[in-house]
Amino acid sequence: MLRFAVLLAMATPAVAQDATIADAAWLAGRWVGEGLGGQVEESWSPAMGGQMAGHFTLVQDGKPVFYELM
């Protein structure tokens, strides 16, 4: 009986859930490190009005070479 219950649970499809802005709250803050051949920084604002704003910067050899606004 237990084996049947486990198999039934594994065969049951997962139910999709709608995402909310609260699901991305962990992104808020400043993230820095090395990658893409240089220093990288990404910052995200806390959620406000149902949105979050972010930016990314890549610096190589002391010069910014790429920006992204999100």
Image (cartoon, rainbow, N blue to C red):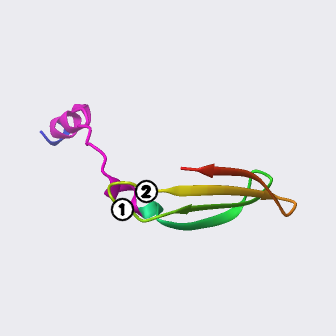
| Residue placed most toward the observer, 67 or 9 | 67
Measured from the top left, where is residue 67 in percent x and y?
68, 52
The residue beneath circle 1 is: 48
Measured from the top left, where is residue 12 in percent x and y?
21, 33
Quadrant position of the N terminus in the picture: top left
As for residue 19 lying within the magenta part, the answer is yes
Measured from the top left, where is residue 52 in percent x and y?
43, 56
Q: Residue at x 59, y 56 (%)?
A: 55
Q: Residue furthest front?
A: 49
Q: Is residue 47 above or below residue 14?
A: below
Q: In this picture, which residue range is highlighted in magenta? A: 4-25
Q: Residue at x 87, y 60 (%)?
A: 61
Choose top left, top right, bottom left or bottom right for residue 56: bottom right
Q: Check disc 2 and report its element: helix, strand or loop.
A: loop
Q: Residue furthest bottom?
A: 29
Tell me the number on the disc at residue 52: 2
Characterize the local packing of mark 2: few (<14), some (14-19) or many (20 or more) Cα atoms within 10 angstroms: some
Residue type at the position of mark 2: Met
Dot 1 and dot 2 residues touching (CB under 8 Å) = yes
Characterize the local packing of mark 1: few (<14), some (14-19) or many (20 or more) Cα atoms within 10 angstroms: few
Q: Residue at x 20, y 38 (%)?
A: 9
As for residue 56 lying within the magenta part, the answer is no
Q: Is residue 14 left or right of residue 59?
A: left
Q: Is residue 2 left or right of residue 49?
A: left
Choose top left, top right, bottom left or bottom right for residue 16: top left
Q: Is residue 8 left or right of residue 58?
A: left
